[in-house]
Image (cartoon, rainbow, N blue to C red):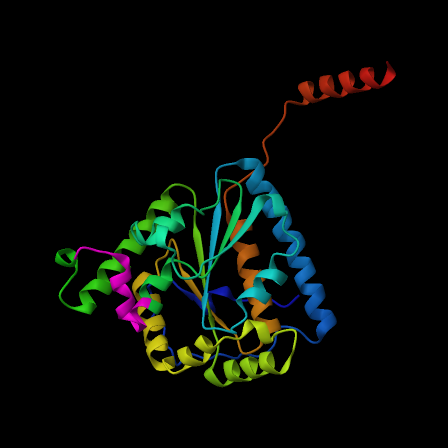
C-alpha cells in the first residue's frame, strides 16, 4: 500500500484553501485489483479501530461530506465504510429543511442525528448547507422565520456570524469527545458535466438527475467562492477540513479511507481489561454449565 501524506489535503487554519487548487492527482493504485485490495486492507484496520472505540465508550466520530452534485459522495460513503460494523454506524442524508425544521434554529435538525459514543456518524451534506446553498440563494433565508430585527443589515455579517456559530458548535462537540472530520470533494466543472451526462445516458441512473442539477450549475462560480470562504473560516486544528481531489473517483475513495482510518487509529482508546483471575473463574463456570 502506498504511503499517503494526509497533511497535503488538510486545512486547519494554518494555510488558505483556494478554489483553484487541483481536482486531480496521480493515482494511488495501479489497477482495479490493487484498488480493491487497498480498500479491503483499510476497511479491516478501520473495523478494528472502530471496535476499540466502541468498547472504550468515550469517543464518537462525526464525518461530514460536502460537495457539488455528482462529486462522488454516495459512492465514496458506500465503498469506504463497507467493512464497518453497521450496528455502530449511521449515515444521515440531509436535504432541504422540512416545515418542522424551519420552526427551530438552523442547527436544530443536525443535533438530532449526532452519533453516540463508540459510534461513527456520517452526514451526507450537513449544516454547512446553511452557509453554502443559502449564501448562493439568500432568498431562502426568509423561510427560516428569523425575526427581521435580529438579522444583520448586510450579508457578510450574517455569514460571519454563522461561521462563528458553526465553529463554536464543533468546538463544543470536540471538547465532549466527538471530533469532526470534514471532507470537501473537490471536482471540476468539466468532470461534473461528464458525470451528469453519464447519468442521463444510463436508464438505471436517470432518476438521479433533476432539472435543479442543471440550474445549480449556472451558479458554479458563486458556489466555488462560497466553499473557499467557508473552508477558510471554519477550518480549525481540532476539526479540520480535508479537500479531496475528486476527478478520479477511485483515488478519492482511497484518500478518504486512509484519512478516516488514521484518525480512528489515533484516538486514545483502548479495550477494557478484565482481571485474569476473574476471567479464569468465568471460563470455569461456563465449562461447568456445559457438563451439566
Where's residue 45, x and y in %? 64, 52
Q: Which residues are magenta?
A: 134-147
Q: Where, quadrant-wise, is the N terminus in this rendering? A: bottom right
For the point 59% across and 47% down, the residue is 49
Judged left or right of residue 212, residue 135 is left
Taking the spot 71% from the left edge, 70% from the top edge, the residue there is 34
* Quadrant position of residue 254: bottom right
Left or right: residue 179 versus residue 87 is left
Say which of 229 and 72 sits in front.
72
**Residue located at (21% from left, 63% from top):** 158
- Residue 169 visible, this orientation: yes
Query: Which of the pair 167/216 is nearer the observer?
Result: 216
Which residue occupies the foreground of this view, 110 or 270? 110
Residue 269 in the image: state x and y as whole percent. 53, 40
How many numbered circles are shown?
Answer: 0
Image quadrant containing the C terminus:
top right
Point out the residue furthest to the right here: 291
Residue 18 in view, yes or no: no
Percent across and percent down for residue 85 are: 64, 47
Q: Is residue 149 left or right of residue 82?
A: left
The correct choice, above or below, for 141 with respect to 108 in the image is below
**Residue 231 placement: quadrant:** bottom left
Q: Check if residue 21 falls in the magenta segment.
A: no
- Return the residue nearer the eye: 284 or 99: 99
Give the answer, above or below, for where 146 lies relative to 224: above
What secondary structure is the stretch in magenta mostly built from? helix
Amino acid at each position: 500500500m502506498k504511503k499517503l501524506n494526509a497533511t497535503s489535503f488538510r486545512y486547519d487554519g494554518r494555510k488558505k484553501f483556494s478554489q483553484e487548487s487541483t481536482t486531480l492527482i496521480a493515482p494511488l493504485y495501479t489497477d482495479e485489483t490493487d484498488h480493491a485490495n487497498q480498500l479491503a486492507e483499510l476497511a479491516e484496520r478501520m473495523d478494528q479501530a472502530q471496535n476499540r472505540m466502541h468498547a472504550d465508550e468515550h469517543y464518537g466520530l462525526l464525518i461530514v461530506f460536502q460537495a457539488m452534485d455528482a462529486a462522488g459522495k454516495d459512492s465514496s460513503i458506500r465503498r469506504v465504510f463497507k467493512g464497518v460494523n453497521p450496528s455502530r454506524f449511521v449515515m444521515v442524508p440531509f436535504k432541504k429543511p422540512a416545515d418542522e425544521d424551519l420552526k427551530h434554529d438552523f442547527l436544530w435538525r443536525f443535533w438530532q442525528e449526532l452519533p453516540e459514543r463508540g459510534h461513527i456518524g456520517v452526514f451526507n451534506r450537513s449544516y454547512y448547507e446553511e452557509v453554502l446553498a443559502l449564501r448562493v440563494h439568500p432568498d431562502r433565508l426568509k423561510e427560516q422565520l428569523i425575526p427581521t430585527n435580529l438579522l444583520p443589515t448586510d450579508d457578510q455579517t450574517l455569514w460571519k456570524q454563522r461561521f462563528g456559530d458553526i465553529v463554536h458548535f464543533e468546538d463544543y462537540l470536540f471538547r465532549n469527545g466527538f471530533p469532526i472530520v470534514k471532507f470537501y470533494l473537490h471536482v471540476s466543472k468539466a468532470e461534473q458535466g461528464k458525470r451528469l451526462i453519464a447519468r442521463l445516458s444510463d436508464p438505471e441512473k436517470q432518476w438521479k438527475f433533476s432539472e435543479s442539477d442543471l440550474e445549480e450549475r449556472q451558479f458554479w462560480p458563486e458556489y466555488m467562492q462560497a466553499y473557499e470562504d467557508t473552508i477558510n473560516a471554519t477550518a480549525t486544528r481540532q476539526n479540520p477540513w480535508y479537500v479531496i481531489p475528486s476527478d478520479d473517483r477511485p483515488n478519492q475513495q482511497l484518500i478518504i479511507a486512509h484519512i478516516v482510518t488514521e484518525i480512528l487509529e489515533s484516538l486514545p482508546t483502548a479495550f477494557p481489561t478484565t482481571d485474569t483471575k476473574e476471567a479464569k473463574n468465568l471460563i470455569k463456570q461456563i465449562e461447568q454449565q456445559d457438563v451439566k
